[in-house]
Amino acid sequence: MVTVKVPDHREIIQSALAAGKMVFSEWPLGNGLAEELATTAAERGLHTFTGLQARSAPAVRYLRDLVADGYVGEVLSTSLVASGGGWGAVFPENGAYLLDRANGATMLTIPFGHTMSGLTMVLGDVEKVTAVTATRRREVKDPQSGRVYRPDVADQVVFGGVLSSSAVASVHYRGGISRGTNFHWEINGTDGDLVVTGDTGHLQLGEFTIDGAHGSDAELSRLTVSERYFDPALQELRSTPAYNVGAAYAQIRRDLTQGGSEVPDFAQGARHHRLLDRIERAAEHV
């Protein structure tokens, strides 16, 4: 299991793969693209797992099934606005490495990356990409020491694109915390609408609610996530940030014992890295 700072992921993962070990790594897999990690794992026939645990969240899995079962009809568009939590006006010293783009641990790779993984699981792959990024806060301060940092990472990420279903998508991440909306995701279709809300832009660890309306419904109503999406063995973790990680571990156990593929392997992780790289390369940085 690899859960160290992102710049150290690659060396540790490669050492474990060279020793013939299966590997679970938190996301991002590494600093930049992860093709060599996926290739090494495939050549050695090793089980690998990528920590994109938003895909394990009960609310996200329920949302995927609602869309797949036709709750909204044909998906026409989706729009999401969220706050990164970090990358705001203040930053503690122990998190300063997140302000250096060269380290690969940014708002784009972490909260935006986790959320895009959940979005594509629910709605399908991204086909066309447009983007804008910006570093609007030129200086941020350590609240304890008063030290000033000058970040070179984006604190604004705006993605626009077309999904494989031809649905239009827009996503806007803002650094820091908003006094207004910190997570709002709509899915609009020919026969209904779904709205997901939460108090954090980190889809991989927050608590989210789903409201929906379809058919002849005149207004939204709360949709309750069925108990079948929760693992009874994780009861003590419910409503905590650790739940989705625990759910991913439970899925890994099922994958290993039953031959499934619920948790993304390194090949899928590398594919998601390529998506984020496409978005970053396509972005006009202003």
Image: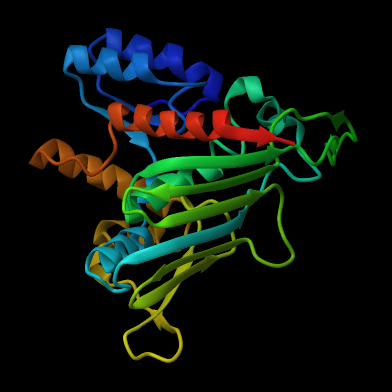
The answer to which image quadrant residue 201 occupies is bottom right
The picture places residue 284, in percent across and down from the top left corner, at 66, 35
Residue 13 higher or lower than 188, as above or below? above
Residue 250 higher or lower than 235, as above or below? above
The picture places residue 55, in percent across and down from the top left corner, at 35, 49
Name the residue furthest left: 258
Which sits in the foreground, 158 or 239? 158
Quadrant in which the C terminus appears:
top right
The answer to which image quadrant residue 25 occupies is top left
Q: Residue 63 vs residue 195: left or right? A: left
Q: Residue 144 vs residue 45: left or right? A: right
Residue depicted at 41% across the width and 75% down the height: 193
Does residue 241 show up? no
Which sits in the foreground, 78 or 259? 78
Name the residue furthest right: 146
Q: Residue 244 vs residue 110: left or right? A: left
The picture places residue 223, in percent across and down from the top left corner, at 37, 78
Quadrant in which the N terminus appears:
top left
Residue depicted at 28% across the width and 68% down the height: 66
Residue depicted at 61% across the width and 35% down the height: 283
Which sits in the foreground, 276 or 90? 276
Residue depicted at 44% across the width and 50% down the height: 242
Residue 152 higher or lower than 224, as above or below? above
Does residue 125 show up? yes
The answer to which image quadrant residue 267 occupies is top left
Which sits in the foreground, 210 or 204? 210
The picture places residue 94, in percent across and down from the top left corner, at 70, 31
